[in-house]
Image (cartoon, rainbow, N blue to C red):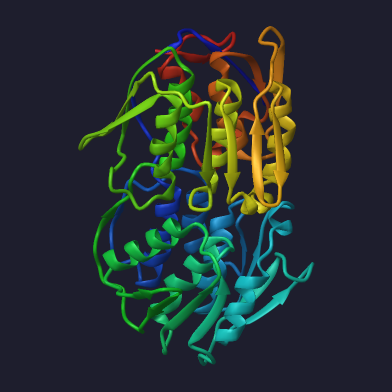
Amino acid sequence: MDIRLVAETRNIKGEIKLNASKSESNRALIINALSGNISELHNLSNARDTDTMQRLLGSDEETLDVLDAGTTMRFLTAYSAVGPKKRILTGTPRMQQRPIKLLADALVELGAQAEYLKNEGYPPHSITPLQDQKADTLTIPGNISSQYISALLMIAPTLPKGLEIVLEGEIYSRPYIEMTLALMKHFGVNHDWSGQVIKIAPQKYESNNYTIESDWSGASYWYSLAALSDDVDLKLLGLRENSTQGDQEIASIMEHFGVKSEFSEEGVHLTKTDKLSEGMFIDFRSCPDLAQTVMACAAVKGIKLSMTGLESLKIKETDRIAAMQNELSKFGAKLIEDEGVWTLEPGTFDQSKEIVIETYEDHRMAMAFAPLSLDFNLLIEEREVVNKSYPDFWRDLEKVGLREADSETTK
């Protein structure tokens, strides 16, 4: 089912209690499961990915269907290597196109068994738990998805010999690795990270209740809306200034788009400034999930972007590079690559015509383009796709005056 949004005002005011971070939620759930569920977790995300993680962690079934949840697939693959019995992990057709080989190979090196049931290196696959730990050092490329590294880190303290991970080359998505280690520390597990090497000795997770922070990825769409509006007086509740989430970088990026952030114990308060850059360089290695939102906003604001760190976008819910090239072209913008550097060239656009946004079964495509409804007559396909990470997204937009066309006014 599709959705058309109508902006009743270009002045964005109010308070939004953001959904909790699914990145934190899913890590905390795995850590708690590894400890025997001895801690209380508060403010867990209501995202479908987190619901899937909770459901599968409590399942006795041999086959675990993660649907389209990439984090859940990676984390449960590693979790199964130290679990009580053999598991088969599967997912949607797109999930079966997303590689798992590097993680599975690492688990085999540790002593587990892995078997691919369809295509070599891809789900569905089975994992048989290790009986004896064969290795205590793994060498892994630093520029792969941090979810592989985080998955191994979380099971590391439960291994008889612990684990040393050597990261080769540049380290991408470093904040997500740091988030994992910070949560492990909260639950009593120490580590040593020196240079390219992370060492974790065998040790036990301890009981320690935890409250999940609001989601900075979800906050990014509100920053885009603020940048595109005429005036802003908006509070995003539940965010921390000293966050472990890499997507907090949106606050710094959006300073160049005319959005000011002021932090308090409640969260962050967004207002407008006169600052607006004509062009900027952004390295998305630490925050790739922000790329679609920033590009869509820049295309309309007329800001030329030079970008690096977009490599991982090709293996997300869809090929996000190809998807963005397609959808940005509808606004006259071009996304061009030259030797690893991507350039967004804003163009001219016709605001009088309806623009149909394809979402490619990708939640971030829908939410990245939704703020552009302030300036354009948009039809966004697959409205339900946002359930993956932010089920309340359309309802929250209503609170600030972006309503579904022809829908009744809600109380």
Left or right, 104 with reference to 244: right
Residue 150 image point, x, y percent: 47, 66
Name which residue lies at 43% across and 70% down.
154
Among the 4 quarters of the image, the one containing residue 17:
top left
Front residue of 1/258: it is 258
Name which residue lies at 74% across and 52% down.
93
Farthest residue in the left direction?
265
Name above or below for residue 319 compared with residue 329: below
Name which residue lies at 70% across and 11% down.
350
Among the 4 quarters of the image, the one containing residue 324:
top right
Residue 237 is at least partly visible in this image = yes
Front residue of 23/143: it is 143
Among the 4 quarters of the image, the one containing residue 144:
bottom right
The total of numbered circles placed on residues is 0
Front residue of 260/23: it is 260
Name above or below for residue 381 compared with residue 200: above
Locate the C terminus and report the quarter of the image it occupies.
top left
Residue 173 image point, x, y percent: 49, 57
Left or right, 272 with reference to 389: left
Residue 405 image point, x, y percent: 59, 11
Residue 67 is at least partly visible in this image = no
Name which residue lies at 61% across and 29% down.
383
Residue 323 image point, x, y percent: 71, 38
Name above or below for residue 388 compared with residue 269: below
Locate the N terminus and report the quarter of the image it occupies.
top right
Farthest residue in the right direction?
119
Left or right, 55 with reference to 11: right
